[in-house]
Image: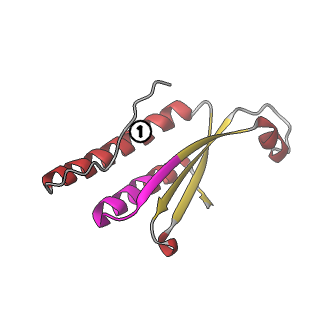
Amino acid sequence: MVQVSADTFLTKVAELYEQTTSASKGSVALSCKSVPVKKIAKQNALGGTVDHVLLFRVCKYGNNKHKKKYSTMISATGHAQFHTSLSQIVKTKIDVAISKDIAGGSAKRLAKVKKTTE
């Protein structure tokens, strides 16, 4: 798993979705995990105050030799802006995949988006 910056992570997410929609093979999984503050404080040698940190991961599943994994760490202060950017990318890529599927005449549903309030 490669840890990258937030901007690079967003571009990689868009690239992975583009690869899966163009090839019609594989899937992309996104996950979010809260990292305990104690772990961050141990890594931070300064011992100052530490914000809560969220770990975002994206993985493209498919053939084992083509599996790609990326992650990024986002602080609580930048979470809202990052989440809106990420959700915009995911919604546009899913809408493109569904419209391609409808145009092809297939009745299969590619993605089911669950709306939640946070």
Please state which amino acid type lies under the numbered disc 1: Ser
28 w.r.t. 37: above or below = below
Q: Identify the magenta region.
A: 13-30
Find the residue positioned furthest to the bottom. 65
Q: Secondary structure at mark 1?
A: helix
Q: Mark 1 = which residue? A: 87
Asked whether 46 or 52 is in front, the reply is 52
Apparent side of residue 55 relative to residue 61 in the rendered image (left or right): right
Q: Is residue 107 magenta?
A: no
* Left or right of residue 26: residue 8: right
In the foreground, 82 or 61: 61
Relative side of 25 to 64, left or right:
left
Label 1 CA crowd tier, 10 Å (few <14, some 14–19, many 20+): few
Quarter of the image containing the N terminus?
Answer: bottom right
Q: Residue furthest top?
A: 117
- The answer to which image quadrant residue 16 occupies is bottom left
Residue 92, position as x, y percentages in the image: 31, 44
* Rendered position, 45 above or below 11: above
Residue in view at x 59 percent, y 49 percent: 72
Query: What x and y, as percent, mark residue 22?
Result: 29, 63
Q: Residue at x 69, y 33 (%)?
A: 52
- Confirm whether the magenta stretch covers residue 19: yes
Q: Main secondary structure of the magenta part?
A: helix
Residue at (15%, 57%) from the top-left corner?
104
Q: Where residue 42 sits: x, y (%)?
A: 84, 44
89 left or right of 30? left
User: How many marks are shown on the rendered structure?
Assistant: 1
* Residue 98: x %, y % from top left: 25, 48
Q: What scheme was used to colour the molecule? A: secondary structure
